[in-house]
Amino acid sequence: MSDSAPDYANLHKLHGNWIKRTALMLKARMPWAELDELLQWGAIGMLEATRRFDRSIGIDFQAFAARRIRGAMIDGLRREGALRRGESLFEPDVVDSAALKDGSSPEDPLAQLMRSDNRVLLVEALKKLPPLEYRVIALHFYDEMNNREIAAILEISEGYASRIRKRALESLAVDLASRVKGETV
């Protein structure tokens, strides 16, 4: 952690209203969420951001903390939802069916793309996506939302959100494959 991160005593003073605003925005998009729980998860996210912040990376603390706070709230909602439904977070059947023949698990398509040496190609491909597909991809990979959360925000069905994400990933794969080969799309 960098010495320039705010100290714990000033966190509430500096960012308490910001955590509350983030919680209220999520509550508005996901009415089933409990505001008190969102606030608690947001505070935990702020503490985690403070511990992990490193100014040498070149990111502003508030930008770094925003993602941690929102992510902590969404993770809390996911955990709480699984507990309410009586599910375990790691169903053995799901994990087994997700394993590849060689025993490894499939990698997230965007993670594969981000690992690419030429991120410019990815940025160009993302710019070519239709607005709805881009928004679904951003909500899923950047904001770490699942189909239910995306559907609630965009006011569409979960199935449609899934189809849009699949279509966008397929478009990105085709676009990137042709760009790597030197073709224009």
Image (tube, rainbow, N blue to C red):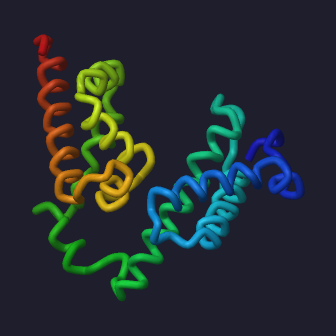
Q: Which of the 4 image quadrants contains residue 87?
A: bottom left
Horizontally, residue 119 falls left or right of residue 156, namely: right
Horizontally, residue 39 falls left or right of residue 67, namely: right
Q: Is residue 73 above or below residue 143?
A: below
Q: Is residue 11 above or below residue 96?
A: above
Q: Residue furthest right?
A: 9
Q: Tell me where residue 151 appears, x and y as whole percent.
A: 30, 55
Q: Residue at x 17, y 58 (%)?
A: 159
Q: Is residue 5 above or below residue 23?
A: above
Front residue of 177/143: it is: 143
Front residue of 173/130: it is: 130
Q: Tell me where residue 171 appears, x and y as whole percent.
A: 15, 32
Q: Residue at x 37, y 40 (%)?
A: 138
Q: Tell me where residue 57 appears, x and y as whole percent.
A: 63, 32
Q: Residue at x 82, y 39 (%)?
A: 4
Q: Tell me where residue 107 appears, x and y as whole percent.
A: 26, 51
Horizontally, residue 181 falls left or right of residue 91, namely: left
Q: Residue furthest bottom?
A: 86
Q: Residue at x 60, y 72 (%)?
A: 37
Split into 4 quadrants, where in the image is the C terminus? top left
How many numbered marks have been drawn onto this rendered protein structure?
Answer: 0
